[in-house]
Amino acid sequence: MEKKIMLGNEAIARGAYEAGVKVSAAYPGTPSTEISENIALYDEIYAEWSPNEKVAAEVAIGASISGVRSMASMKHVGVNVASDPLYTVSYCGVNGGLVLVAADDPGLYSSQNEQDTRCVARAALVPVLEPSDSQEAKDFVKFAYDLSEKYDTPVIVRTTTRLAHSQGTVTLEERVEVEDKPYKRDPGKYVMMPGNAIGRHIYVEKRMKDLADDGSGFPINRAEYNDTSIGFITSGIPYQYVKEACPNASVLKLGMVHPLPRKLIEEFASKVEKLYIFEELEPVIEEQVRSWGIEAIGKEIFTVQGEYSANMIREKILHEQVELKAPAQVPARPPILCPGCPHRSVYSVLSRLKIHAAGDIGCYTLGAVPPLNVIDTTVCMGASISTLHGMEKAKGKEYIRNWVAVIGDSTFMHTGVNSLMNMAYNQATGTVIILDNSTTGMTGHQDHAATGKTLKGEIVPAINIYHLCKAMGIEHVVEVDAFDTQKLEQVVKEEVARDAVSVIITKSPCVLLKENVFPYKCKPVTDACKKCGMCLKPGCPALTMADNGTIVIDDTMCNGCGLCMQICKFGAIERVEA
Amino acid sequence: MTKNIMIVGVGGQGTLLTSRILGGITLEAGYDVKLSEVHGMAQRGGSVVTFVRYGENVAEPIVEEGQADVLIAFEMLEALRYAHFLKNDGVLIANEQQIEPITVVTGAAKYPENIIEGLEKEYTLYKVNAMEEAKKLGNSKVFNIIVLGMAAKHMDFSKEAWLKVIEKTVPPKTVEINQKAFLKGYES
């Protein structure tokens, strides 16, 4: 059989394919995005970008009820958005198998918090599988569909950044076409009003107990007995760290981390002398195991923050002196907006006008850091607009005369649109800037409802953001070229002063979109340079100051947007055809 | 024995392409292999690191401090940042390019001086001005493949195997220039 190196996310997509999945829905979010991008390559699966994770989950639920196998995938905070349907579909159960992939981010590589999806799953009474490498990622997805249909339950496959973005070898198998389950009207199961839900809750509790009992016999929960003086209970990527640091220890590798297979755990605990529980993030396994009266060591020596490592075990358990050289003290290199990014142009205007911004989730969150320092708040998707509204209602409209909300086009379509409806309805006077770069930038350029292209590459009518805002009854909606800084400055001044809600849509495609590269390069005109450093203020990485104070522009980095040229009052930067 | 390779650089410098080639060649040679990458926000000009581990049976997908056999650095500051991941007998292959991080551009920090001299004292260092060499070949974008070519001398695969996997990995139009770039490094 063919072997391939696959990203964890690619392997999940392959698992969905081999399991006969027919419908997949998602909203992009690191580290889950590549699941959908890879699923979209299979002609046998309908795959879409939905506007947000709640919608994606509901699409998958509908597909399941109609009788086909379906998947929704999202990052951990996306699970929060999807939690409303998730908690209740747990009661409904499934017709065709239903799997939700949730990608956690220990170490916060690309997220706003470090929450643990297992906690959500415990509350929602949904089983969770956790693979440890790419091969298991594929295998567990297939097993998840069998479990889903056998136990009438949605199943969460939980990954972490390290698994999602690691590659490993995977053995490919054929797709098994699963026959659609016949649809039968069953309101007691699919109409969750109180009378029906009472009965389903009883079913759900029994289901979780059955899963816990049967779990001791699942092949994905595996006791590996070696030296029994040390035993580990672990799962996911941390299992690999255990194998690396203590190849001879006994290990109980849990493939299903909720509900826990109690019998198997009790048996393992009774056979090892010292029991460690090695789990990243929250002490989910540890607290349950201890509640059964089993002695175990866990979070008193291992942190609830960040990623684990094999060195951690060597140090804390084996007490090996890991001799490490001290890292060199070097300047940090945080991510920055790209050269030619339209967000930088908008922020340079806001910065000049000393305007504060309630921010949102995307590349443009980088407007919070030096040298731009424009964004003051960032909470979650869509929150920019509603937090600005809250400020106004708390402190009055004068208070927000030097404030705006900034939100990207994709984030606006995700949940920002609800918040803007609220501003329109509740008579706000704030100004919302929609940074429309025609894509979902930070996750690597995914389309959305306002770009006019689907995940499968079909060209479709784009939802027009301008008309959408107008349809809410917002009178003042202005579209401006993001790089026309003069006009933008004037529009921002007018709109923040206005005693009514207003929307400014700044337009210019993401500079990394291939069709958008400016056909220019910016060049310094050194003789005219007054060494004032104004052009450096927006923090374009292509610009640096030479030792003599004049400006140098890195030809390989410059994307020719011309923002620096607009800022220079002395004509010391020109733009030439590339 | 598992071999531990790291590729470090600045987001956008092509670490992902380089790791794809590395992954491809290890698999062709019949090894078990794991790679770990950074996607998402850090790719926007941030410090990025990719781990590649190959051998009979690879458990963890990351290379931990003090365990790298080969460290491939596309940028000097990043070479310095990750040098302590090298084993005592590890090899550092560094592109001499310097890219100022925003912390330096804004004056909040200073780009360290004499990085090469300092690293040479502590590590086995092979350096190259890959950008210059790539320009001579006619395409500055292939600088990373020149650096990979130099690093390839410290791994366990034949020249022919490298050229073959490059052919399979890069876009068809760029096969020739990438192979040339590889040989430039490999035969230097």
Image: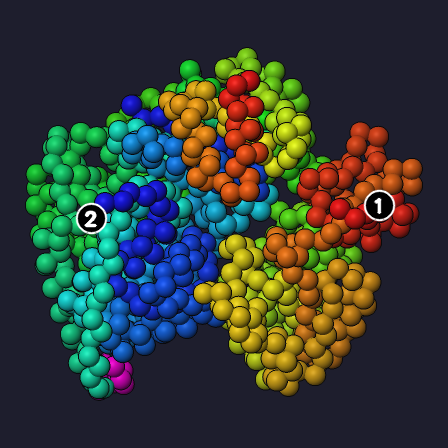
Residue A195 covered by magenta stretch: yes
Quarter residue A70 falls in: bottom left
Image x and y of residue A478, in percent:
72, 74
Mark 2 / mark 1, whichever is N-terminal: 2
Q: Left or right of A567: which side holds A103?
A: left
Q: Is residue A305 above or below residue A61?
A: above
Relative depth, front residue between A361 and B63:
B63
Quarter residue A168 falls in: top left
Image x and y of residue A79, in percent:
38, 63
Q: Residue at x 65, y 54 (%)?
A: A511
Amino acid at the residue labelled 2: Leu
Q: Quickly name the residue at label 1.
A: A573
Q: Secondary structure at mark 1?
A: strand
Q: Quickly name the residue at label 2.
A: A254
Q: Can residue A122 be seen here? A: no
- For the residues marked 2 and 1, what is the alpha-carbon distance in whole angstroms? 61 Å
Label 2 lies in what chain?
Answer: A
Q: Is residue A31 above or below residue A416?
A: above
Amino acid at the residue labelled 1: Ile
Q: Residue at x 45, y 70 (%)?
A: A50
